[in-house]
């Protein structure tokens, strides 16, 4: 257990199947590949910074923690996040599975929800970089979603990308706002309210 201490790993960060790596408010920085077979957990507002290949986050418990993807061509792990941050200037991170986060921030770079990927944002989403949806990708929203700032872009195209409520049976109110120089480019997009 790291508690409030920080850990930086230059090589491969791995945790065996029966083991746990935990922190409360510490920062874990993986500069090499991360491949967790066991457990990775935060008990407080800790941070996991991923600068390289993400093979697996294992059994992940976010609590109040933040996971920041900063590497080249990363695939976002299909786990439940508290705060997911994409911060990889001129690079792309890809979502191809199903996962959720309370808060999404695309600070820089591109987050692509590909093919049949499903991203659920239960509280707030802010895009200052680019969020791209392709084919039958789905973005489920449960609160305020904003594309804001010069160069901020939401783009959708392909089969039928969909933006909908986090609960389609009893819809949750959400807002989708483009402001302060942000833009939308779409060749196909289905909004379900």
Image: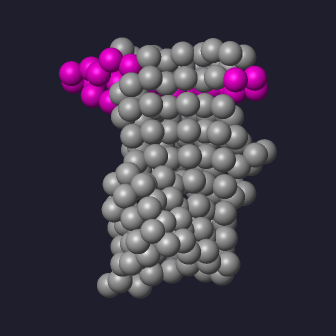
Q: Position of residue 78 (x, y in %)?
A: 44, 55
User: Which quadrant holds the N terminus?
Assistant: bottom left
Query: Left or right: 97 with respect to 9?
Result: left
- Residue drawn at x 44%, y 23% is 144
**What colouring style does the render use?**
one colour
Identify whether 131 is placed above or below 52: above
Q: Position of residue 112 (x, y in %)?
A: 61, 41
Identify whether 127 is placed above or below 186: below
User: Which quadrant holds the C terminus?
Assistant: top left
Residue 3 versus residue 49: which sits nearer the camera? 3
Query: Farthest right residue?
Result: 90
Picture quadrant where residue 119 is located: top left
Q: Is residue 82 magenta?
A: no
> Is residue 25 shown to the viewer in this render?
yes
Q: Is residue 167 magenta?
A: yes
Residue 97 versus residue 110: which sits nearer the camera? 110
Q: How many marks?
A: 0
> Is residue 34 shown to the viewer in this render?
no
Residue 148 versus residue 111: which sits nearer the camera? 148
Picture quadrant where residue 50 is located: bottom right
- Residue drawn at x 49%, y 72% is 5
Query: Farthest front residue?
Result: 4
- Residue drawn at x 65%, y 39% is 107
Magenta region's main secondary structure? loop
Q: Position of residue 8 (x, y in %)?
A: 61, 74
- Residue drawn at x 44%, y 17% is 175
Query: Left or right: 77 with respect to 131?
Result: left
Identify whether 22 is placed above or below 165: below
The range drawn in magenta is 149-174
């Amino acid at each position: 257990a790291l508690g409030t201490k920080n850990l930086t790993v230059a090589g491969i960060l791995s945790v065996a199947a029966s083991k746990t790596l935990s922190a409360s408010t510490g920062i874990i920085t993986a500069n090499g590949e991360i491949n967790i077979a066991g457990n990775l957990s935060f008990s407080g507002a800790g941070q996991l910074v991923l600068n390289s290949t993400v093979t697996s986050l294992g059994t992940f418990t976010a609590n109040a923690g933040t996971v920041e993807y900063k590497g080249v061509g990363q695939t976002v792990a299909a786990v439940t996040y508290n705060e997911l941050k994409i911060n990889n200037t001129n690079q792309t991170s890809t979502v191809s599975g199903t996962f959720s986060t309370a808060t999404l921030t695309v600070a820089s770079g591109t987050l692509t929800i590909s093919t049949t990927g499903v991203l659920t944002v239960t509280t707030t989403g802010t895009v200052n970089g680019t969020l791209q949806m392709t084919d039958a990708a789905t973005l489920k929203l449960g609160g305020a979603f904003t594309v804001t700032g010069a160069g901020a872009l939401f783009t959708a195209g392909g089969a039928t990308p969909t933006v909908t409520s986090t609960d389609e049976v009893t819809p949750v109110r959400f807002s989708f706002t483009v402001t302060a120089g942000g833009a939308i480019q779409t060749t196909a997009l289905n909004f379900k309210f």
